[in-house]
Amino acid sequence: MKKSHQNGNSIKMSKGNRTLNIICYVVVGIFAITCLFPFALMISSSFMKEKEIVAEGYKLFPKELSIAAYRYLLDNPTKLINAYKVTITTTVVGTVLGLGAMSMAGYVLNRKDFKYRNFFSFFIYFTTLFSGGLVPTYILNVRYLHLKDSLWAMILPGLVSAWSIFLMRNFMKSIPDELYESAMMDGAGAFTIYRKVFMPLAIPSLATVGLFLALGYWNQWYSASLYIDTPSKYPLQYYLQKMINQTNIEALTSQGHFIDAETLPTQSVKMATAVLTTGPIILLYPFVQKYFVTGLTMGSVKG
C-alpha cells in the first residue's frame, strides 16, 4: 500500500480541488474588499478639503489631506468626551442589565417544570405583533415613570427584546437536562443552577445577544431627542448629530464664529462624525467574534 505522505496524515489534493480553493479564496477576497471599501472611503473622505469634495466628490486618495473636519468636531473636546461618557455608561449599564433580564427569562421559559411557561411565552410573543405607539410610550415614560431628562430614559425602553428572549431560550434548549438534574441532586437551587451551570455554557448566546444590544445602545439618538433636555446628558450620536446640523453659516455666525464659506467642512464633517461613532464599536467585535463559533455544550457532558 502506498503512503500518501511521509507522515501518513496528509492527503494530496487533486488539481480540481486546488483550483476550486483558489477560486473560493479569490471570490471571498473580492467580497471582503467590497465590504471594506466603504469604510476606507469614509476614513479618507474625512481628511479631504471641502473644495475638493464639492468639485470632485468623495475619493479614496485625496490630493491633499486636511484635518479641518476633526478640528471642528474637537473644537470643544470637553463636550465630546462627556458625550462619550454618557454613551459608554448607557451602553454598559443597558447591556449588562438587559443580558441579565433576558437570560433569566430565557432560562425560566425553557424549564419544563415551570407551569406557566406557555402563557408567558405567548404574552411575550404578543408584544412583537402589537405596539402601544409613540404617544402612549412617551406619556408612560414621562408622566408615570418620570424619566424625562434622565439617562434611564435611554436605557429602560430598550432593555428587553422579545426576539432576544426567544433566542436565549432556544440556546438553552440545547443544554442537556441531565446537567439540571445532577445539579439538583447535589443540592443546588434554581438561581445557583442558572448562575453556575447554565450561564457559563451560554457564553456564545450571551455574546451574540450582548453585541446586538450594545450596538443598539451605542447608536441610539432618537430616545435622547425625545427625553433629554440637558446638553451634558446628550449621548454621542445625538451630540454629533446636532454638530452636523450646526455646520451651516447661519447657525455658526449667530454664535459669534468667523466662518469662511469656502473652507467650512460641511461634507467632510459627516464622514469624520461617522469615523468617531463607528470606530470604538468596531474595535469591540474581534473580542466577541470568537464566541460565535464556540460550541454551546462543548465539554459539558462526558460519556
Image: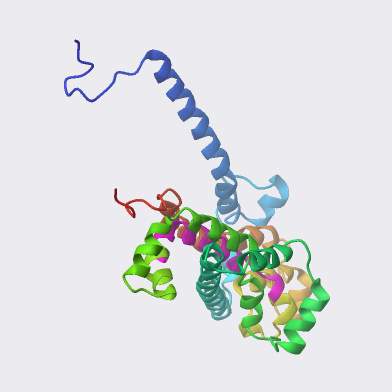
Residue numbers of the magenta segment: 199-223
At 43% from the left edge and 18% from the top edge, which residue is drawn?
A: 19
Q: Establish if 23 lies above or below 30.
A: above
> Of 130 and 250, which appears nearest the observer?
130
Measured as percent of width and height from the top left, residue 210 is found at 51, 63
Name the main secondary structure of what is drawn in magenta: helix
> Of 45 and 207, which appears nearest the observer?
207
Badge count: 0
Measured as percent of width and height from the top left, residue 86 is found at 56, 78
Image quadrant assignment for residue 181:
bottom left
Q: What colour scheme has been applied to the protein in the rendered image?
A: rainbow
Kindly give the residue lying farthest to the top in the view shown: 1
> Of 50 and 300, which appears nearest the observer?
300
Quadrant the N terminus occupies: top left
Q: Would you say 37 lies left or right of 25 here?
A: right
Kindly give the residue lying farthest to the left in the view shown: 6
Q: Establish if 143 lies above or below 24.
A: below
At 58% from the left edge and 80% from the top edge, which residue is drawn?
A: 79
At 17% from the left edge and 24% from the top edge, which residue is drawn?
A: 7
Measured as percent of width and height from the top left, residue 252 is found at 73, 75
Q: Would you say 259 lies left or right of 92 here?
A: right
* Magenta highlight on residue 203: yes
> Of 265 and 86, which appears nearest the observer?
86
* Magenta highlight on residue 202: yes
- The answer to whether residue 244 is seen in the rendering is yes
Measured as percent of width and height from the top left, residue 114 is found at 55, 69
- The answer to whether residue 64 is seen in the rendering is no
Image quadrant assignment for residue 12:
top left
